[in-house]
Amino acid sequence: MGERKFDTKVQHLKYKVLREVARQAWNDTLFQNLLDIPMMIVPGKVPTMRCCVYKERAILGERIKIAMGGNRENPNIIEVIDIACDECPAAGYEVTDSCRGCLAHRCEDVCKKGAISFDHNHVAHIDKTKCVECGQCAKVCPFSAIVNRKRPCQIACKVKAISIKENNEAAIDNSKCIQCGSCVYQCPFGAISDKSFLLDVIELIKKSAGNTAYKVYAVVAPSISSQFTYAKPGQVVTGLKELGFHTVVEAALGADMVAGEEAKELFEKGFLTSSCCPAFVQYIKNTFPDMLPYVSHNLSPMATLAKYIKAHDETARVIFIGPCTAKKAEAQLDSVKPYVDAVITFEELQALFDSRDIELTSLGEELLYDASYFGRIFARSGGLSEAVAEGLKEQGITFELKAAACDGIEECRMALLKKSKNVLDANFIEGMACVGGCIGGAGCLTHGEKNKAGVDKYSRNASEKTILGAVAALEKEKK
């Protein structure tokens, strides 16, 4: 079986760790072979990106811990691997080789903290102990010789939850972090990662084998249509059954349910923000707490469908599979925990398939419970707003929807800020923390604009053409 293609080599390394941990867990040999796994992944004294193979293996040991659930005392899904976070330059303003040693010394004049000094060649130097990173020196330099070198993780984190400690390691402020995983995907050394709950999933599947006490359901995010592109969607469904899942349902059915209810709630309240993206909801809690009364009371599509499944099947155990690291955090909430037993990403699902040597392209095709076009397009930015508009229409509700479809957390911030100042020309905020929507989630196998085309094509193939039709079909199936 050939190695799968990932956007980056960091993703591929992460996948290999997950695959090997999963393989050992299936065979009940994980703890016996725990110390040998790093050597299985990096065999011999091969060249690595680190100073030596021994440090590489030490870092792999930390990656394995995160693959096994990480630090349970840390409530954050996102963790920094300290030993791997030592190659990036210290962040902040620095003087580059472009400094000409001019006589004007405008940088010195504008610095109110006395952080700038000069050597015998008049070349500027910045005292980091005094610098407050105001950026004034960079603005006045005629040669643009002073630059702000932010680390990739800091650039990726739009909520400013990442800082740099004295030892130059990254630190995450849990009070600001929305667990979107942007830093995970952007870190070029893989020094930031999301905790995995693969072991919980494997344990549930193993216990359910031959046991009628409960059945394991896979609730699959509609953005899966833009992933696993080397196989057909029906083959992915068959692969999930091969893994041991009893039933596979698309989360888009939960989106159909939410769209109808959210449309009614919007009509009743006159203004609403969506509740589907857990990172967006967490951002409101952290930064705009006064906006919380406007957040839809509806559970997310994941939780809504999981609740429905468990209401109709007391033996059900529900695993959500999608592109989102924040969903792992959502599953820990008291309002969601009774319905969702574990969350894994598409990255982790690929590792699961390969840990069992399941080659999707060799499998037959099985069908999902079908959702509507509108439920499926929740996966991309703007889709939720379209679905709410359709929900209003199908239910005969006369209401002029004026949606602000926010593509990424920065657009969310602007919309919430405008609403807080009563200058937002919209009555519905669709908040998507990831650029592109769920198709841009950190747990995707691949990222980019091509994912949107994949979702739209998949959505147009839905056999159910209306939201109410999809919900009615599900009710009929359960009866």
Image (spheres, rainbow, N blue to C red):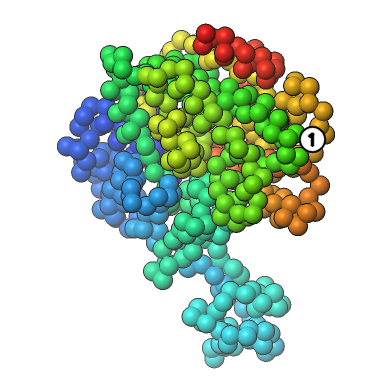
Q: Which residue is mark 1?
A: 401
Give the amino acid type for the residue marked by disc 1 in the picture.
Answer: Leu
Split into 4 quadrants, where in the image is the N terminus?
Answer: top left
Side of 118 relative to 360 (left or right): right
Q: Is residue 295 above or below residue 214?
A: below
Numbered disc 1: secondary structure:
loop
Residue at the location (34% across, 58% down)?
83
Side of 403 relative to 244 (left or right): right
Side of 72 relative to 250 (left or right): left
Residue at the location (20% across, 32% down)?
29
Q: Of residues 318 and 366, which is closer to you in this image?
A: 318
Visible residue check, residue 7: no
Residue at the location (38% across, 40% down)?
196
Q: Of residues 35 and 391, which is closer to you in this image?
A: 391
- The picture places residue 24, in percent across and down from the top left corner, at 25, 32
Residue at the location (27% across, 52% down)?
58
Q: Of residues 65 and 37, which is closer to you in this image?
A: 65
Question: Which residue is situated farthest in the front direction here?
Answer: 268
- The picture places residue 346, in percent across and down from the top left corner, at 47, 32
Visible residue check, residue 260: yes
